[in-house]
Amino acid sequence: MSGDDNKNLKILFFGDIVGKPGRNAVKFYLENLPEEEKPDFAIANVENASHGFGLTEKNYNELSSYGIDCMTSGNHIWDKKDIFNYIDTAGKLLRPLNYPQGVQGKGSAIFECGNYKIGVVNFLGRVFMNLVDDPFKIAEEEIKKLKEITPVVIVDFHAEATAEKICFAKYCAELGVSAFFGTHTHVQTADEKILNGMGYITDAGFCGTIDSVIGMEYQTSLNRFLKGIPERYEVAEEGCAQINAVQVEISPETGYASAIKRIFCSIDKVEKDESQ
C-alpha cells in the first residue's frame, strides 16, 4: 500500500489477531474495503495470530500477502519456537524494543509508504507483565532517532494496566509521536482521541471470534477459573468473527494526527483452525 502526494496518510491498525478466525477476518475486511477507504499503511498486532499463541513463519507470510505492511507483537511473540529461525529476516515484524540487549529481532523500523517514510516502534509494559527494560527510559532516544528520518512515528504499547498505557501515551505525545495504539487486553476501549496532535486509544481490541473469552474458547477458560489448574487454551472457532481496528489520519509533512476513528464490524463466517 502506498501514500500519495498532497494528502494525509491513512494508517489502519488492527488489534491483536487471534488464530485463524482473526486472520480470516482481517483478510476478508481488507479484500472488501471500498477503494476510497483503503489505507495507505496497515499495521497489525500478530502475537496471537498462530492458534492463539505466537506467530509461525507460514502465518507471517500469509498476513503479508493480505496487505499488512507492519506487524507488531508483545509478550507472546516467542511462543512458536520457529520464531527464532526467521525473526531476524522478517522485515515487517517487530518485537518489543525494551527486551534486553541481545534478544533476537528488532523493536523499531522505518517503512516506505509511497513518497514518505513511517517509523514504527513496539514497546512492552511492565505492570503485571514480564520483567523487561523500562520503556520510559528507552522511548526518548528511540523516538528522537526515528523523527530525524520522518515526522511520522507510530507506537504500539503492549501493556496490561490502563494507567501505565495512559501515562506512557502522554509521554509519547510530548516526544512528538503521531499515533499510539494500546494492545494486549483484547477489549476495545471507547476513548479514541487526538492527544496533543497524537492519535490515541487505550486498547485497539482484537480480531477473532466474537463468542469467546478474548478470542479463546469459553469452556477451557472457565476450567482454569473453576479448578485453578493450568489447561491449554483453545482458540474459539465457531460463529461470527469481529474486526477491532483504529484508523488515524496523519500529515506526512508535520507528523500530526488530524482524525481518528474506532472500527468495529462483525463477519459472519470463520473457518476452523485445523493447522498451525
Image (tube, grey):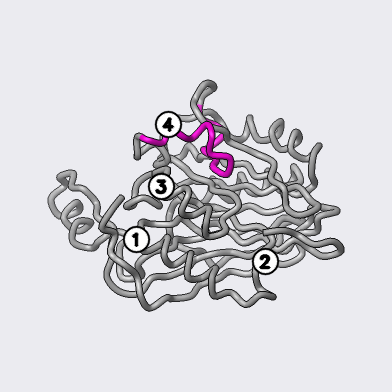
Residue 93 among magenta residues: yes
Residue 171 among magenta residues: no
Amino acid type of the residue that numbered disc 1 sits on in the rendered structure: Gly
Q: CA distance from mark 2 to mark 4?
A: 37 Å
Of mark 4 and mark 1, the one earlier in the sequence is: 4
Dividing the picture into quadrants, the one containing residue 222 is bottom left
Of mark 3 and mark 1, the one earlier in the sequence is: 3
- Residue toward you, 30 or 252: 30
Q: Secondary structure at mark 3?
A: helix
Q: Which residue is mark 2?
A: 260
Residue 154 lies, in percent from the top left, at: 66, 49
Q: Secondary structure at mark 1?
A: loop
Q: Which residue is mark 1?
A: 215
Q: CA distance from mark 4 to mark 1?
A: 27 Å
Left or right of 259 on screen, residue 227: left
- Crowd tier of the residue under label 4, counting other residues whose Cα lies within 10 Å: few below 14, some 14–19, many 20 or above: few
Q: Which residue is mark 3?
A: 58
Q: Secondary structure at mark 2?
A: strand
Amino acid type of the residue that numbered disc 3 sits on in the rendered structure: Lys
Amino acid type of the residue that numbered disc 4 sits on in the rendered structure: Asn
Q: CA distance from mark 1 to mark 2?
A: 25 Å
- The tally of labels here is 4
Which residue: 62% across, 35% down? Answer: 136
Dot 2 and dot 4 residues touching (CB under 8 Å): no
Which residue: 69% across, 33% down? Answer: 142
Q: Which residue is mark 4?
A: 85
Q: CA distance from mark 4 to mark 3?
A: 12 Å
- Crowd tier of the residue under label 3, counting other residues whose Cα lies within 10 Å: few below 14, some 14–19, many 20 or above: few
Task: Please identify the quadrant where the N terminus is shown.
Answer: bottom right
- Image: magenta residue range: 82-99
